[in-house]
Amino acid sequence: MKAWQRTLWCGEASLEHVGEEVVVNGWVHRIRDHGQLIFVEVRDRTGRVQVVFDQGEVPELHREVREWRSEYVVAIRGEVVRRLPGTENPQLPTGEVEIRPRGVKVFSAAKPLPFELDHADKVDEILRLRYRYLDLRRPELQENLRLRHEFTLRAREWFARHGFYEITTPLLTRSTPEGARDFLVPSRLEPGSFYALPQSPQLFKQLLMVAGIERYVQFAHCFRDEDLRADRQPDFVQIDLEMSFVTQEDILQTVEAMMVETLAAVGREVPHPFPRLTYREAMERFGSDKPDLRIPYEIRDVSELMGESDIGVFRKALEGGGRVKALAVPGGASFSRKEMDQMEDEARSLGAPGLAWLAWQGESLRGPLARFFFQEGRWTSLGERLRDILQLQEGSLVLFAAGPWQKAAEILGHFRQQLGQRLGLAERGDRLLWVLEFPLFAWDEELGRWDAQHHPFTLFHPEDEALFAEGRLGEIRAQSYDLVWNGYELGSGSLRIHQREWQEKVLEILGFSPEEAQKRFGFLLDAFQYGVPPHGGMALGLERILMLLVGAKSIREVIAFPKSASGTDPLTGAPAPVDPHQLRELGLQTVLSPQARGIQ
C-alpha cells in the first residue's frame, strides 16, 4: 500500500507541481475514450484532476484502463505536466495541468450506480437517501459537510476564547414537558420505566449554573417526536449556551457577536447590529414572529378607517373587539379571479371566514369590495384615504383580514410571505433580527388551560409581576427572545426563573399540582434551595444556520445521514421491528391496530 499512498490531493494539482512524480488516490469521476487517448478524471474530496492514457506511451495501462468504469477507487502514479496550449479547462481549478501515468492500481471496483451523481438533483430523494453514501460523493454535499465542520470549529473556538466550558449532558434522562413528544427508551433493569431522549439540555444546563460553571456551551444532540418539515428533523444538533449573572442584553450581545464573527470566519458577512422588534410589533407589522425582512412591505391596521365605513363584515368584527388589517402587495393586481378564489379558499383553511381584496389595474378597481372605494371611474373619499394610508400604487393588490388582532395578522402574514416569494419581491441578501418580549403564557382553547409560550422555566418581565395577582396572565411578557434569519427562526432563549417559589407558582398556573411538580421537576426545585445565580441562555439550530448559509431548501442537505420527510431512514430501514426476545427482556409487547397487522 505504501507505494500507492497519496502524495498529492487531486484538487491541489497546479503548475507548481509540473515535473514532479506524484501519486493520487480517489474515485474515477469520468472516462472519455478517444481511441489512442483515454482521458480519466480522478476525484477526491478536494476536487478533480485529469489523467491522460496515451496508447503510444503506456500501451499496457491504456488496455487496463479500458476496463474501468466510473466510481472505481484507484491510485495513479505519474508525472504532472502542463496541458498543451488551447486544451486548458478554465472551469476546473486544476485545468492547467494533467497527469501522464506511469502506473495504476485498482483498490476497488464498482458496479453501475443506481443513479448518476451528476444528475442527482433530478433523482427522487428517497432513492438518494437509500444510497446516501453515494449521494454524499457529490461535491456540493461534500462542500456542505466541510462548511459544517468549519462553522462548528470556528464557533467552538469563539466560545473557548470567551470563557465558555464545553460540557456534555446526558442523552438518557427523564421525560419532562418541553413542547413536543419525547422519544422514550425502555429500561431493562427497571421494567415498566423509561428514559427519554432529551428535547434539549434545558434542565441540565440550569443545574450547571447552580453548580457554579457560569458559562456553558454544548453542541447538543436533541430529539423531538414531532411532525417533520424542510427545516426540522427528529434528531438534530443545537448550539446550546447558558450564562450566570447576566442580563438579557448580555446574552443578546454575546450571541450576536458569536454569529457575526463565526459567519465572517467562513466567508459570510452579515449586516449588524441586528434590528430588534417586540413580539407584538413583529405580529402587527409582519403577521409573523419570524418575519422575513427582505420582503419590503408591511401590514397596516385600518380599523379606524373601516369603522367609518358601511362594510358590514368589518363593522361586525370591530364591534366584537376585533381589528381590520390590510396588506398592499405590489404587482399583485395581475392575479386572475381564479387565483384570487384559490387564495380565499386558502384563507378559510387557515381559520379565516374569507379574504376580502381589491385589485387596482389601470383606471379601474376590482374585487368584492370595490364599490365602497371606487365609483364612476373615481376614488371615493374612503378609497382616497385607504390609498393614502397604504401608499397604494397602480398594479397593487390589497388583502384585508378582520377578526381578533392576532388571527387577522397571521392570515395576512401568511400571504405576505407567500406572495413576496411568488412575485420575486424579496430582496437579496441576509436579514437577521431579534424578536423580543414574547407572551409568557398562551391560552390553549382545546384543553382550556394555560401553556408556556416558550417553556415553563422562562422568567417574566419585571414590570409585569403585578399582573399575576390581577389574573391578567395573557398580558405578562416573558424575558425571552428569538433570533430570526430571512424568515427562519434560528433559535430561542430566555432569562430563567431562579427562585423556587416563582418556579412553583408558574408550574401551578400550567396545571401541575405540588405533588406532580415535585415528581416531575423535583431535582431542579430541590437544587433551587441551595443558592442559584440569576441566569439565562439560548439554543440555536446548527442545521438551520447551515441550511441558510449554503442556500439549501432543506436541512437534510447539511446532515450526513438525515431522515426522510416521514421520519424514516431509507438507508438503514429505521424505525423497524425488533426481535421478540428483546421485547421480552424489556417486559414489553406491541399492540397494533388490525390495519397495522394487515387485517382489512
Image: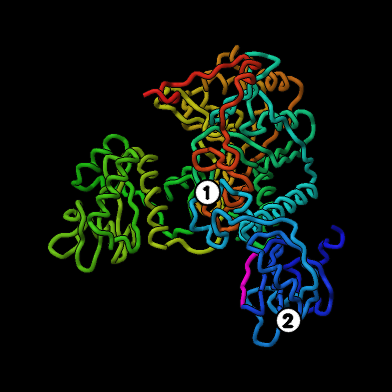
At label 2, the amino acid type is Gly
User: Among all residues in the image, which is located at the extreme left?
Assistant: 376
Q: Which colour scheme is used?
A: rainbow
The residues colored magenta run 29-34
The secondary element bearing badge 2 is classed as loop
Question: On the image, numbered disc 2 is attached to which residue?
Answer: 56
Q: In this view, does 439 lie above or below 126?
A: above
Q: Magenta span: helix, strand or loop, mainly?
A: strand
Q: Mark 1 points at which residue?
A: 127
Residue 388 pos. (x, y %) = 31, 60
Q: Is residue 425 left or right of residue 38?
A: left
- Residue at (80% x, 50% y) in the render: 161
Label 1: state its secondary structure: helix
Q: What residue type is labelled 1?
A: Leu
x and y percent of residue 102 in the render?
A: 80, 73
- Residue lying at 63% horizontally and 25% vertically, measured from the top left: 196
The answer to whether residue 273 shows anywhere in this view is: no
334 versus 582 height, above or below: below
Quadrant of image for the N terminus? bottom right
Label drawn at residue 453:
none
In three-dimensional space, the C-alpha distance between marks 1 and 2, rounded to whole angstroms, equals: 43 Å
Of 369 and 575, nearer the camera is 575
113 drawn magenta: no
User: Is 33 in the magenta?
Assistant: yes
Indicate the quadrant where residue 33 lies.
bottom right
- Above or below, comparing residue 528 to residue 283 in the picture: above
Q: How crowded is mark 1: few (under 14 residues within 10 Å), some or many (20 or more)?
A: some
